Image (tube, rainbow, N blue to C red):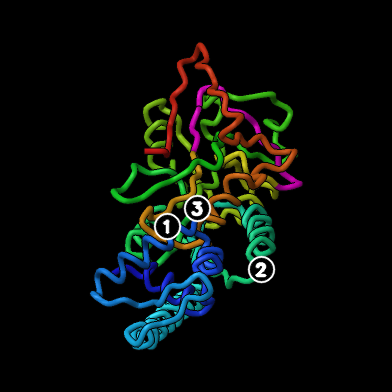
Amino acid sequence: MELYQIRHFAAVAETGSFTKAAIRAAVSQPALSASIAKLEEEVRSKLFHRSPKAVTLTPAGRRFHVTAQEVLSACNKVKAELRASVADRPLRIGVLRTLPSTQLARLIETLQRELSETRIELVDGTQEQLHAQLAGRKLLTCISTKVASEPGQRSVELLREDYGLVVSLNHRFASYESVQLSDLSGEPFIVRSHCETFQGTTKLLAERGIRSRVVYKTDQDDRALALVGAGMGVALMPSIFDAPNVKKVPVRDFEAFRVISLHWNEDVADDRLDRVVAFATTHNWASSDREVRTPSSIVRPTRSRLGPKRISVTR
């Protein structure tokens, strides 16, 4: 016995007509008649008196109707409770801590308009922390750098951005169209200790014999930008970061880039997740004055004659 058969039975019992019941159940009349016939065969009882003028319940049909109403009422109650529980749960989104505050604010402002009925909670973290929480079902989704696909997880690329040198407007490099890594030897460096390319960049500088003079280490990008703007040093940062008092200068033989993606568990059935995925993939991640490449406009840079080293955090 299937639930749809019970629904079909209730529709006939309440309308007194196979034609009206078929309309209510949104099925053809032959399909509904076959459903009722199969139900009567399964319960081994005739449930309806059929006549050209009316369809009425038999004694067995009246007894079955009482039980059918209880079953359908219980199903509707459970469905309502489950839907309410999903609606009451906050939408927990993990956000990579190296995403700029301005970009994050733009994203959340727009997302809250799209999901005005949903409570949104943000969880800040590193790449490793976010993916661990996603695997542990503590997050519905996360925006993070791309990693090798975990079993049962899906992802979609949101943007791809290059790294470059950030200097103050008064620095001599501010007037350069580009620089080479060798130009940075001896420069005072502000190091982003939480950077996804930190280890790879450190290794590359050592291989090239470039000695950086670290004057400050921080895990706060806003502070790094502020100190660069104040002239304390230079920094290597993703192109999405910007400030009025700094200049971004390309490094010809340094082609590091990172891919930011949206990640989620593929077995999650939640309408809110579908809406977040649809929203994130159409969101304008790059403002007009930033050179950030979205998936539809990605153009791979060619290698220069200096044989640049490409560092990727896509893993």
Name the residue beneath numbered marker 2.
116
Residue 298 image offset from top left, x and y in percent: 57, 28
Name the residue beneath numbered marker 3.
143
Q: Quadrant of residue 293?
A: top right
Depth check: give the residue in front, 111 or 217. Answer: 111
Label 1 residue SS:
helix
- Residue 219 in view of the camera: yes
Residue 195 image offset from top left, x and y in percent: 47, 47
Q: Amino acid at mark 1?
A: Ala
The mark found on residue 223 in the picture is: none
Depth check: give the residue in front, 197 or 39. Answer: 39
Q: Name the residue: 51% across, 22% down.
A: 253
Residue 170 appears left or right of 15: right
Query: Is residue 254 magenta-colored?
Result: yes
Residue 118 image offset from top left, x and y in percent: 59, 70
- Residue 85 in view of the camera: no
Q: Amino acid at mark 3?
A: Ile
Label 3 residue SS:
strand
Evaluate if marks 1 and 3 touch, with contact meaning CB atoms under 8 Å apart. no
- Of badges 2 and 1, the one in the foreground is 1
Q: Name the residue: 62% across, 37% down.
A: 292
Mark 2 or mark 1: name the one nearer the start of the chain. Answer: 1
Label 2 residue SS:
loop
User: Where is 134 relative to 252, above or below?
Assistant: below
- Of badges 2 and 3, the one in the foreground is 2
User: Where is 90 relative to 275, above or below?
Assistant: below
- The range drawn in magenta is 243-258
Name the residue beneath numbered marker 1.
31
Query: Is residue 246 magenta-colored?
Result: yes
User: Where is 34 relative to 293, above or below?
Assistant: below
Residue 252 appears left or right of 171: left
